[in-house]
Image (cartoon, helix red, strand yellow):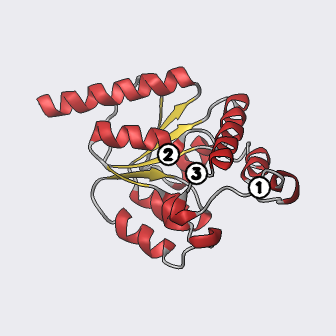
Amino acid sequence: MTLRPLDALPTSPRRVLVAGVSGAGKSTLARRLARILGLDYVELDALFHGPNWTPREEFVADIEAFSSGDRWITEWQYESARALLAERADTLVWLDLPYRLVFARVVRRTLTRRIRRQPLWNGNIEGPLSAILTDPEHIIRWSVRTRRKYRDLGARLARSHPHLQVIRLRSRHEVEQFVFAAGTHRADQRDS
């Protein structure tokens, strides 16, 4: 079932995924919703990346552990995690924002992290800016290459995981409407 930003949620979300391409704002929205809905936020990048950008061997086991819990929110990314997370989640918020907005965000975020040498997960730091030209897996190149990845996400999930409530957000305005509605829904749940 695909819902619009202001549609009333049929149930209070307890296990939530936030989907979207790189730079869509998955982590930011997940943190905001965690506070509003009283959910534990688990950042998948922190579980996936070990020192020197190496994948952590415990990644899938960590996902199995937290996703067996009752109330959580995380990003829907990493192929090795997607099926398990979709099976255990009850709600998926799909950030289907205009690519020009997303691309600007991923470039700005990458440049800011590199210039400030901002430590990320497990002490990792964005590589040199020249890597944009030499590394096919560089996040900016990845963003361009995968920008159409979720084009038919709603239909695919309706077939493979019909239990999921899917909320598709297509603009910053719709994101803000949804956050407001989620807060209102949560307040109504507490009052009843």
Instruction: Give the Cα distance between marks 3 and 1.
Output: 13 Å
In-front residue for pair 83/66: 66
Foreground residue among 38 and 112: 112
Q: CA distance from mark 2 to mark 1?
A: 23 Å
Q: Secondary structure at mark 3?
A: loop
The reply to whether residue 149 is in sight is yes
- Which percent across, then down, holds residue 192? 11, 30
Q: Quadrant of residue 165?
A: top left
Mark 2 or 1, which is nearer the eye? 1
Identity of the amino acid at label 2?
Answer: Ser
| Residue receiving disc 1 | 128
Q: CA distance from mark 3 to mark 2?
A: 17 Å
In this rendering, position of residue 155 left or right of residue 46: right
Which residue sits at x=52%, y=20%? Answer: 173
Residue corresponding to mark 2: 27
Which badge, 2 or 1, comes first in the chain's sequence?
2
Against 78, is 103 above or below?
A: above
Residue drawn at x 48%, y 40% as measured from the top left: 28
Residue 42, picture quadrant? bottom left
**Residue corresponding to mark 3:** 118
The type of residue carrying mark 3 is: Gln
- Badge 3 local density, few (<14 within 10 Å), some, or many (20+)? some
- Residue pictured at 57% horizontal, 66% vertical: 49
